[in-house]
Image: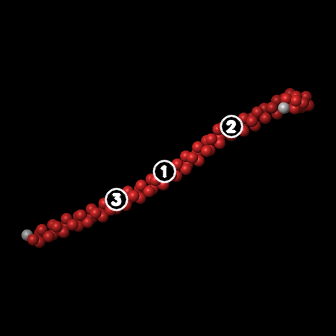
């Protein structure tokens, strides 16, 4: 690499050689950044999305069970009110 760099510097000038070197450094930096930063962030994000989907599914199942219980409570409450009404009517008829 150093011989090629020296040949480029001799042929095109120091400024161009420095530009090539800087471009190569930026390329290596971008590659390192992608490997060490971007890929782990992407993996963690996908893991987070999987956990979020599972959590939402759990919430939906819990809400469905809660609605079933609430519906049963409402039905029982209506039956209780109807039953109380019948008892009152029977008491008034007996008197």
Q: Is residue 41 left or right of residue 3?
A: left
User: How far is the residue under mark 1 from the one under mark 2?
Assistant: 32 Å
Image vertical order of residue 91 relative to residue 8, above or below: below
Residue under the image location 62 percent in, 41 percent down: 40
- Which image quadrant for residue 6? top right
User: How far is the residue under mark 1 from the one under mark 3?
Assistant: 22 Å
Work out whether mark 1 precedes mark 3 in sequence or the reverse, and give the earlier one: 1
How does the figure colour the protein chain or chains?
Answer: secondary structure
Discs 1, 2 touching: Cβ within 8 Å: no
Q: Is residue 92 left or right of residue 11?
A: left
Identify the mark at residue 70; answer none if there is no mark: 3
Other residues around mark 2 within 10 Å, as few (<14) / some (14–19) / many (≥20)? few
For label 2, the SS is: helix
Other residues around mark 1 within 10 Å, as few (<14) / some (14–19) / many (≥20)? few
Residue matched to label 1: 55
**Residue 57 rendering spot, x and y as whole percentages:** 48, 54
For label 3, the SS is: helix
**Residue 55 rendering spot, x and y as whole percentages:** 48, 50
- Whether residue 9 is visible: no
Residue matched to label 2: 33
Work out whether mark 1 precedes mark 2 in sequence or the reverse, and give the earlier one: 2
Discs 2, 3 touching: Cβ within 8 Å: no
């Amino acid at each position: 690499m150093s011989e090629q760099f020296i040949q480029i510097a001799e042929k095109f000038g120091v400024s161009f050689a420095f530009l090539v070197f800087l471009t190569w450094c930026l390329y290596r930096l971008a590659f390192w950044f992608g490997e060490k930063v971007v890929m782990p962030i992407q993996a963690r994000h996908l893991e987070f999305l999987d956990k979020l989907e599972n959590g939402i599914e759990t919430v939906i199942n819990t809400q469905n069970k809660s609605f079933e219980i609430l519906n049963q409570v409402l039905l029982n409450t209506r039956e209780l009110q109807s039953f109380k009404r019948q008892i009152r009517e029977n008491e008034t008829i007996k008197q």
